[in-house]
Amino acid sequence: MYDFEYHKPSSVADAVKILAADPDARAISGGMTLLPALKLRLNKPTSVVDLSGIADLRGVKREGGKLVVGALTRHYEVATSAEVKASIPALAAMAASIGDTQVRNRGTMGGSVANNDPSADYPAALLALGATIQTDRRTISADDFFQGMFATALEAGELVTAIHIPVPEKAGYAKMKNPASRYSMAGVFVAKGPAGVRVAVNGAGNNGVFREAAMEAALSANWSADAVAGIKVDPSGMNGDIHGSAEYRAHLVTVMAKRAVVDAG
Amino acid sequence: MNAVQPFEGIGASVRRKEDFRFLQGRGMYTDDINRPGQTHAFILRSPHAHATIQGIDTAAAKAMPGVLAVFTSADMTAIGGIPCGWQIHNKDGTPMAEPKHPVLAEGKVRHVGDPVAVVVAETRAQARDAAEAIVVDYAPLQGVSSTEAAIAPGAPAVHDGVAGNLCYDWHIGDKATTDAAFAKAAKVVKFSTTNNRLVPNAMEPRAAIGEFDAMSGDYTLYTTSQNPHVIRLLMGAFVLSIPESKLRVVAPDVGGGFGSKIYHYAEEAIVTWASAKVKRPIKWTADRTESFMSDAHGRDHVSTAELALDTDGKILGLKVHTLANMGAYLSTFAPCVPTYLYATLLSGVYATPVIYAEVKAVFTNTVPVDAYRGAGRPEATYLLERLMDVAAREIGMDRVEFRKKNFIPTAAFPYQTPVALQYDSGDYFSTLAGALETSGWATFEERRSEAKARGKLRGIGISTYVEACGIAPSAVVGSLGARAGLYEVGTIRVHPTGSVTVLTGTHSHGQGHETTLAQLVADKLGVPMANIDIVHGDTAKVPFGMGTYGSRSLAVGGSAMDKAMDKIIAKGKRIAAHLMEASVDDVEFERGTFRVAGTDKTKSLTDISLAAYVPHNYPIDEIEPGLDETAFYDPKNFTYPGGCHICEVEIDPDTGKVSVMGFTAVDDVGRVINPMIVEGQVQGGVAQGIGQALLEAAIYDADGQLISGSMMDYTMPRADDLAPVSVATHTTLCTHNPLGVKGCGEVGAIGSPPAVMNAVVDALRDFGVNHVEMPATPAKIWNIINGHRMAAE
């Protein structure tokens, strides 16, 4: 990797101050995306701002009808949290399915959300659950937050601090993993909750995570796997590569939607 | 020191001695070695598949911090190209095209990853920083990656002077008698397939350290090699002109090779040569990205086969046409893989009367292709065993019965095939029967029905195979174009107090030689395992040996050790006869004890070794002191392991995902020295075979860009891609080596891919499919299923 300055602030305010002063500084949380990019010399920040010293950004708590997950909460912690398992078991199961043991012990929900990798797991959950992303300066609904492949509503230097997730009546997740990378090729998170029935898809789309309106309507009328089984997804919005065509991914979205509904019960 | 207790000899599953250090992370690999004053090299590689180099500006790089030197081919005019170790002749008797393989690109790059320049700096990061400051003026050319495109008229020329990118056009067998057999055939079955290209991906990336001692003029190369003497010969004699006496090559612990570490690579020559220029040791270690674009790849054949049958389903003849990708340059053994390691195996386990095979080897703008676990035999076995299934289905015969009908009868050994090989022993009926029994072949339809009830498509596949390994008789391979002998050497050094050091010319890079080879000594000389050490991998310690590949270590290297032990015993008997005042003809030896036949007079091996090194009471006029013997062994023939592999798969029709549900291997590997290690070797080979069948594919675009250039896109098998592999052996002894061993290192990778793919095709039997190309990825399988459904709608 190229040389950079390393900062380890102990407060969000200090972190934001460093990031605001230098547009080429990068925040690092678990580092599961930025570190490989640095090692491959694909990224050349002037400074790296390590957020791991900010203690109050970590942990899960239940506040009334919602879960509040600190941005630095690691996937392993979400997967094993008694609160998450009791409130949104599908979210805990999703966290347990991310990457491998090493990734789950380093990667964080805030990092995943801020990066918005189209093949990442969490964005589909947050979109389907109608979550709100809290930053150092405002709150943003998931619908407004995720804006396409690797694109979010975050301004330069703005940090995700917590994710507020309404507890649904039921939720489920299913994904087809890319055989090589094991990232999601097509993952569907379904939820029936305060925001209604919502279906969000990761991995498959050619512009990042998205909601599948036809499936939402079908499941609102009839919450069953059969309700989505006949819904064909338009391949023109899907990604195609050596691992599968757009048609294959479109098909997988329907298959995974069925499985997610079964998973939700 | 009498019989070894508990039994540690031949047939015992002794735990691997080397695992104590490997499992604790205490191995000593090349990258673990650091020499005083060591510097670091970074190799600048071509991002283009094909381009002319119009200029290289290294001035800025040379001025970078920590940089000691920057070299390009312009600095290397005094050194030779990387040699090829095997020369194939064309049908017309002319030699193959053998264009120069420069150490650093000379005026042109021919594949992504082709080395262009090297930076030597104080640290690896400084070397890499400086490499980014080198300005290479490339003029990109049209590239070509597939064999079919490369031999098409008008294809870009990879090498000037190599017409049509054709390396050679070779054949084997008798065309006239084969044509005649086809003319009489009741049925001819045609089949075409591609054997997918693979990236070896040993766990340890390649690394090399070059060191020059200006006082002595000696060079040392530490390298990740399967055969340090071969590297010394090729690099010393052909590239750098360093006498053997001045060049030491050390291959310490090596973390997997699978063939990819047989070859002499440019980086070895670069660090050795440059260490004398900068007068300091130089280390180079590949990162995984470099490995993908610089380690020799494997397989990459496109083949068409035709099988002639009579009305009873007996095979009358076989014709094969194969295009083999050589990549951009000829790697060390590349030319022999699609010829003498492939086409000679096309008889398989069948009594095929006549065979004619043509092979064209083709240059492309891709990484060189060479032997990869199995080397030619997996390609032959896959082609043949898929063809057998296709043919059985076409003539409506049960695929097991079809195979049995055509098996070489057990009484027919030694069996001469029409493609040069003479199989010494085998019993294909017994390995088949064992595998059918273990796999529950007879009850498969019940499992298929049960799977169907769960919405899954279940299939079962079989492969019956033979391979040729234990390479190789030197005179035979010499007549076929090998530029080296393929004997092996072993030294048995009995120390004064009876412990033993073995020097072997073979090399262990995961196979467990430190255990298996020691068991030979424990068994024959009666020395406890704890008192036996195996030394390998250092040309300064070990006599000139040929290394490890082609499942040769036990069959050839072990046989050399056996011969050396015979010499130890013969000498020991003469010393024992003197000490016991008996005739040497009356002295017997068994597992550590010399005995005067029919008496209770005995001497232990330790008594003898002590007498040999402290020759006070010793027939010094007749026998030299010491007990240290070396033998060279040149095999009389290849060895022929064979067997039967059966695989069961389930396909999820919704996603196309293929899951391996069970795998049965019953192999004849000759005498088994360590059953546990054999089981592990077969399982590892099967894992690679499943990888080839279901997961792995090196994918280039048409112009030669490597699309699957990392593990994000190249699917290495993971534990959950596999299933328990049941391994059993059924032994017929090799008839021509003293141990009766055949070899087990490659059988798993050779026998398994067609078993897996026959199972996949069987699972799809209701979908009108008669073939699926490897790898059977979820998307590919779903396309087949979906296409069938759409056609039905």
Image (cartoon, rainbow, N blue to C red):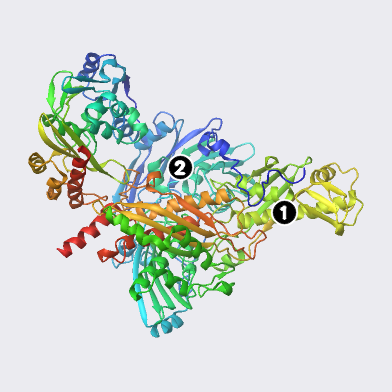
Please rate how many residues cluster around mark 2, counting C-alpha atoms within 10 Å: few if below 14, some from 14 to 19, many from 20. Answer: many
Q: Is residue B16 visible?
A: yes
Q: Is residue B317 left or right of residue B629?
A: left
Left or right: residue B536 compared with residue A135: right
| Residue B197 seen by the camera | no
> Splitting the image into 4 quarters, where does residue B632 fall?
bottom right
- Residue topped by disc 2: B205
Closest to the observer: B674 or B115?
Answer: B674
Pinpoint the chain carrying mark 2: B
Going from the N terminus, do you reach mark 2 or mark 1 first? 2
In the displayed structure, B674 sits above or below B288; it is: below
Secondary structure of residue under mark 1 = helix
Give percent across and percent down for residue A55.
29, 16
Residue B564's mark? 1
Query: Is disc 2 placed on a helix, strand or loop?
Result: loop
Mark 2 or 1, closer to the camera:
1
